[in-house]
Image (spheres, rainbow, N blue to C red):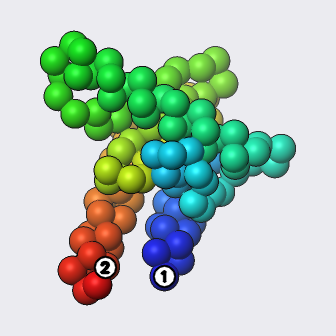
């Protein structure tokens, strides 16, 4: 059931946002849970690299007294990579097209993260 909720959230995000090229929800251990990826992108590699980024971002935020890690943005020549913490166990990683309106993309990603958090809270209390 969790995988179905996550899959629906990811597909709804991609339907809503024409700026996204790929997205995945990954565990902090680097396992891809669900993904909507461009061709030739390995979901296992996305998961492992995202987990490494999560770890580094968390350590850096703590070292620099910035509190808990929330999100990271990486700018490339052909788009951006956004990494957002969903829970202690999950993160959302998405890529955008170059020239995307990042304010709108961030709002859409945050809305999706909040939707997933609500489902996780509901599922935890129902268990």
How far across and how far down the image is residue 2, in percent?
46, 75
Total numbered labels: 2
**Res 45 visible:** yes
Q: Residue 122 shows which numbered tag?
A: none
**Res 14 visible:** no
Which of the two residues, 69 or 20, is positioned nearer the viewer here?
69
Task: Name the outermost residue toward the top.
Answer: 64
Query: Residue beneath label 2, please?
Result: 123
Q: Does residue 78 lie above or below 97 as drawn?
A: above
Task: Name the outermost residue toward the right.
Answer: 40
Q: Secondary structure at mark 1?
A: loop
How far across and how far down the image is residue 41, in percent?
76, 43
Is 91 on the left-hand or right-hand side of 75? left
What residue do we see at 52% from left, 30% from top?
Answer: 52
Find out whether the residues at labels 2 and 1 contact each other: C-beta distance under 8 Å: yes
Image quadrant of residue 68?
top left
Q: Going from the N terminus, do you reach mark 2 or mark 1 first?
A: 1
How far across and how far down the image is residue 91, in percent?
43, 48
Query: Residue beneath label 1, please?
Result: 1
Q: Secondary structure at mark 2?
A: helix
Q: Residues within 10 Å of mark 2 (few under 14, many from 20)?
A: few
What residue do we see at 32% from left, 50% from top?
Answer: 88
Which of the two residues, 56 or 86, is positioned nearer the viewer here?
56
How far across and how far down the image is residue 22, in percent?
63, 47
Q: Residues within 10 Å of mark 1 (few under 14, many from 20)?
A: few
Pick the quarter of the image with the C terminus: bottom left
What residue do we see at 59% from left, 61% from top?
Answer: 34
Q: Does residue 27 lie above or below 4 as drawn?
A: above
């Amino acid at each position: 059931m969790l995988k179905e909720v996550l899959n629906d959230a990811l597909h709804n995000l991609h339907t809503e946002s024409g700026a996204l090229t790929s997205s995945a929800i990954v565990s902090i251990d680097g396992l891809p849970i669900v993904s909507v990826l461009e061709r030739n992108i390995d979901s296992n590699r996305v998961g492992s690299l995202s987990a490494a980024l999560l770890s580094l971002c968390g350590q850096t935020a703590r070292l620099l007294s910035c509190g808990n890690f929330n999100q990271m943005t990486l700018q490339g020549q052909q788009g951006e990579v956004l990494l957002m913490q969903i829970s202690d166990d999950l993160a959302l990683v998405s890529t955008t097209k170059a020239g995307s309106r990042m304010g709108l993309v961030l709002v859409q990603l945050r809305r999706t993260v909040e939707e997933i958090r609500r489902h996780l809270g509901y599922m935890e209390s129902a268990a």
